[in-house]
Each structure stands twice: as structure tokens, then as C-alpha cells.
Image: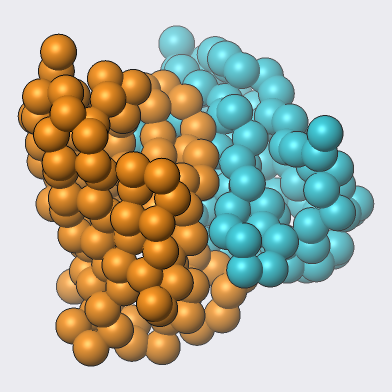
């Protein structure tokens, strides 16, 4: 079955360290997205990509970076410039009018 | 004004009850509307799309009111397993960027 795979499920980051969250999809979707969710809050858009080798900043892009070298892959790097990275990170893709399909998420904690 | 606003609840209802809640959106050009369900510490999952004529999926009924710019979700004969947070999701100027409400929490008690 097609879907989105995020890894790792849990990630611990030390202060000042960059970490990369993986997102892979085999749905043949063009558009992919990264969201952040904080406890009791809605999803906030970090970055999105509608096509390979192109991506746009979302509402909270500062301290994050992405790449889209392949259609299937959209990794997110949380840099040391992101001062409050502890959150639940969700990757999603979209196929036309059928809404998003989400990965199972990565829970990032700063230690 | 937020693009999508929801009553956060919580709505605490007994098993078998009917519960309904709304979501308002600010972009009159929005074309696509969805309800997602999110369980604690899990990813959101599509519950149902919302069509202009309203639509039903088992015990769930969704309605769209374009004039007043809101969508609604009604759950009949609530089950314990319906306890979750329900996210309202609305498209922007195109179908490739969706906006999320913060969610409405429903708790069904025995």
C-alpha cells in the first residue's frame, strides 16, 4: 500500500545541534509539506514543495531548511537557529482534491 | 483573524448522544473542505470531505454553508471510540495549500 514514511519516530537533540527528519512517500504525489504541532495547538506550516527542486517557506520557516531533490523525498533539517524545536513534526503529501495524507510523525525533544 | 477557527471544546457527551460543532473560515474563495480526526499523539487522518450539498458517512454528517462561511460536523449515536480531536481543514486560493483549525476535542463517556 502507498503511504508516507517518517523517521525516526522519536528524536533527541542537544543544544546547538542540527538534526534531519526524514520523509518518504510512494504515492506519486507532487506536493509535500512539513508541519509542526505543539501541545494543544493546531498545525503550523513550516515549508512546502509543489515540485522537485522547488520549495516555499510556510508560516514558521525560520530555523528550518528543506530540500527536494527527488519526488519521493522531502527531508527537514532543524538547525541550531531554531530556538524552541521541541514539537511533533508531521510530513504530508497531497493528491488533488482528496486532502492530505500524513506520515506518523516525528517527536523531537531538546535535551 | 485566523484563517480557520474552531470551538476548542471539550465536548463531553454520554454514549449514544448526538454532538455537533462548527468551524468558520475567512477565505471566501476556498474550494475544498475536510474534517480530520486526530487521536492523542498520533497523526491526523481524513474523516471525510465536505461537499456543497452536504454529505453523510455512517453516523457522521458534514454540512457546508458558503454564505456564512462555516462547515459543521454532526456525530450521531456517539461511541467511546469517537473520542478524539476533530480538525477542520480548508483550502486556500488553490487546493495545494490547506489551513487547519486548532481542533475541537470530543470526549464520549460510558
- The image's colouring method is by chain
Q: Position of residue A66 (x, y in %)?
A: 70, 49
Along the horizontal axis of the image, is B52 left or right of A96?
Answer: left
Position of B87 with respect to B97 (left or right) is left
Is A45 situated above or below B52?
above
- Percent from the top left, x then y, of residue B94? 56, 80
Please give the letter of the chain rendered in orange. B
Q: Position of residue A43 (x, y in %)?
A: 40, 47
Closest to the observer, B15 or A70: B15
For chain A, the rendered hue is cyan
User: Could you say which quadrant of the image residue A75 lies in?
Assistant: top right
Query: Toward the viewer: A11 or B38?
Result: B38
Please say whether residue A48 is visible from this viewpoint: no
- Location of the N terminus of chain B by quadrant is bottom left
Left or right of residue A104: residue A44 = left
Q: Which residue shows up at 44% across the image and 50% down it? A: B57
Up-down relation of residue B33 to residue A38 (above or below): below
Residue B67 location, quadrant: bottom left
Q: Is residue A56 above or below residue A72?
A: below
| B60, B41: nearer the viewer | B60
Task: Check the image and name the residue furthest to the right.
Answer: A70
Amino acid at each position: 500500500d502507498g503511504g508516507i514514511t517518517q523517521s525516526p519516530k522519536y528524536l533527541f537533540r542537544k543544544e546547538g545541534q542540527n538534526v534531519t527528519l526524514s520523509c518518504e512517500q510512494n504515492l506519486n504525489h507532487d506536493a509535500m509539506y512539513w508541519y509542526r504541532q505543539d501541545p494543544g495547538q493546531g498545525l503550523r506550516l513550516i515549508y512546502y514543495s509543489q515540485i522537485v527542486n522547488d520549495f516555499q517557506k510556510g508560516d514558521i520557516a525560520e530555523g528550518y531548511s528543506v530540500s527536494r531533490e527527488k519526488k519521493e523525498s522531502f527531508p527537514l533539517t532543524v538547525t541550531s537557529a531554531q530556538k524552541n524545536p521541541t514539537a511533533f513534526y508531521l510530513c504530508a503529501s497531497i493528491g488533488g482534491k482528496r486532502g492530505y495524507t500524513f506520515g506518523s510523525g516525528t517527536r523531537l525533544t531538546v535535551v | 483573524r485566523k484563517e480557520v477557527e474552531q470551538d476548542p471544546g471539550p465536548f463531553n457527551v454520554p454514549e449514544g448522544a448526538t454532538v455537533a460543532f462548527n468551524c468558520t473560515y475567512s477565505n471566501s474563495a476556498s474550494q475544498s473542505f475536510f474534517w480530520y480526526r486526530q487521536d492523542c499523539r498520533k497523526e491526523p487522518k481524513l474523516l471525510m470531505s465536505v461537499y456543497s450539498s452536504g454529505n453523510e458517512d455512517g453516523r457522521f454528517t458534514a454540512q457546508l454553508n458558503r454564505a456564512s462561511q462555516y462547515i459543521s460536523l454532526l456525530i450521531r449515536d456517539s461511541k467511546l471510540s469517537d473520542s478524539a480531536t476533530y480538525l477542520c481543514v480548508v483550502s486556500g486560493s488553490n487546493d495545494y495549500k490547506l489551513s487547519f483549525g486548532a481542533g475541537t476535542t470530543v470526549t464520549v463517556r460510558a
